[in-house]
Structure formats: structure tokens, C-alpha cells
Image (cartoon, helix red, strand yellow):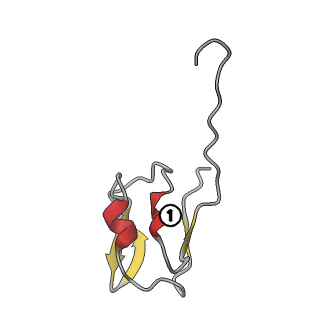
Amino acid sequence: MFEIPRIELGKCDGCGLCVSVCPSSALTLVNGMITFAKSGKCDWCTECEAVCSSGAISCPFEIVAESRAGLI
């Protein structure tokens, strides 16, 4: 199962910043509240969480960068 950002609607102020930074168009505003767009697919970039000043979006996953010996 893929993890997607968690949205706490009670904290969402409807500013739309997360929609504007989402590179995969996974988020949209409906009636002033954030939701996942039917046509979008989250690519786990965490940009939405970074710009959400109300704390309504949290990403329950970590992006882990790993180097392989001799490749870097």
C-alpha cells in the first residue's frame, strides 16, 4: 500500500499553497478545502507539507537517499 500525505481538514484554511506547489497535480481545492484530485497521483515529493503553514498536511513517510559505494 502506498502512503500519501495525510490531510487534517479541521486545520486546512483553504489557502491553496499546496495545490500551487504540487508537481503532479495530486491536490485540489473543493469548496475551500484541500483534497486529492481524481486525476492526480502523488509522487511523494513532500512539497505540500513544506508550504502548509496551518499544519493540515503531513507526510507519514521519509525520503531516504542512499549512496552506493563507488557511484558518488
Q: Which residue is mark 1?
A: 50
State left or right for residue 54 relative to residue 26: right
Query: Above or below — where is 65 with respect to 24?
Result: above
Q: How many marks?
A: 1
Q: Quadrant of residue 14?
A: bottom left
Q: Amino acid at mark 1?
A: Ala
Residue that protrudes farthest toward the right in the picture: 69
Q: Is residue 54 above or below residue 45?
A: below
Examine the image and state in which quarter residue 36 appears: bottom left
Which residue lies at the image location 51% right of the left edge and 81% below the top edge? 54
Q: Which residue is depicted at the point 45% across and 53% down? A: 42
Q: Nearer the viewer, residue 26 or 54?
A: 54
Residue 4, x across and y down, in percent: 55, 58
x and y, in percent, of residue 65 in the image: 62, 36
Find the residue positioned furthest to the front: 72
- The C terminus is located in which quarter? top right
Residue at image coords 61%, 45%: 63
**Residue 25 place in picture, x, y as percent:** 33, 58
Left or right of 45 on screen, residue 60:
right
Placement of 23 over or under 51, stated as above or below = above
Secondary element at tag 1: helix
Label 1: how many Cα within 10 Å (few below 14, some 14–19, many 20+) = some
Q: Quadrant of residue 58?
A: bottom right
Which residue occupies the extreme top position in the image?
A: 70
- The spot of residue 50 in percent (x, y) is 50, 63
